[in-house]
């Protein structure tokens, strides 16, 4: 993400430094693509994070809240049962869930 932000900031500042007499609306045109991408990326991220925070997104194995809290990155393993959702072949397996089924 930083690799995308840095060139935009440098470009706008260089143009502002080279031509300080331009209308401020010209700089708004330069910032618009950056703003559009940021909105398109942050709104879905924020909605997904709210789903995790309020427990709306459940673990496919144990049907408990997958992750608690508001974090920038969600781990691929469930906090309740430890299921790794990146399981290959459609099977969802974990050591914790296998131990729980053996105990029953």
Image (tube, rainbow, N blue to C red):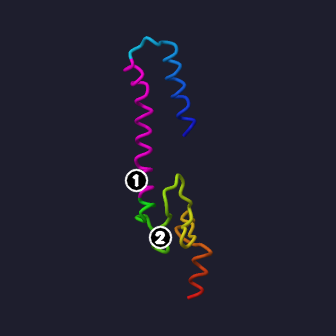
Q: Label 1 crowding class (10 Å Cα cut-off): few <14, some 14-19, many 20+?
A: few
- Where 61 sits versus 68, above or below? below
* Secondary element at image label 2: loop
- The stretch of residues the image draws in magenta is 24-50
* Secondary element at image label 1: helix
| Nearer mark to the viewer, of 2 and 1 | 1
* Mark 2, residue position: 60
Give the quadrant of the C terminus: bottom right
Distance of label 2 from label 1 (alpha carbons): 19 Å
- Where 101 sits versus 6, above or below? below
* Mark 1, residue position: 47
* Residue at 37%, 20% in the rendered image: 25
Q: Is residue 35 magenta?
A: yes
* Image disc number at residue 56: none
User: Looking at this view, is 98 or 71 the one in front?
Assistant: 71
Asked where in the image residue 40 lies, by quadrant, the reply is: top left
User: Looking at this view, is 50 or 100 the one in front?
Assistant: 50
Q: Is residue 21 left or right of residue 2?
A: left
* Residue at 40%, 36% in the rendered image: 36
Asked where in the image residue 50 lies, by quadrant, the reply is: bottom left
Residue 27 percent across, percent down from the top left: 42, 22
* Residue at 55%, 68% in the rendered image: 79
* Disc with the residue nearer the chain's start (2 vs 1): 1
């Amino acid at each position: 993400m930083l690799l995308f932000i840095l060139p935009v900031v440098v470009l706008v500042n260089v143009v502002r430094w080279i031509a300080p007499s331009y209308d401020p609306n010209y700089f708004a045109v330069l910032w618009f693509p950056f703003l559009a991408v940021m909105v398109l990326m942050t709104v879905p991220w924020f909605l997904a994070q709210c789903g995790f925070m309020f427990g709306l997104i459940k673990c496919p194995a144990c049907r408990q809240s997958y992750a608690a809290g508001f974090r920038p990155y969600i781990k691929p393993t469930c906090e309740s049962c430890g299921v790794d959702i990146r399981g290959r072949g459609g099977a969802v397996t974990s050591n914790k869930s296998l131990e729980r089924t053996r105990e029953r």
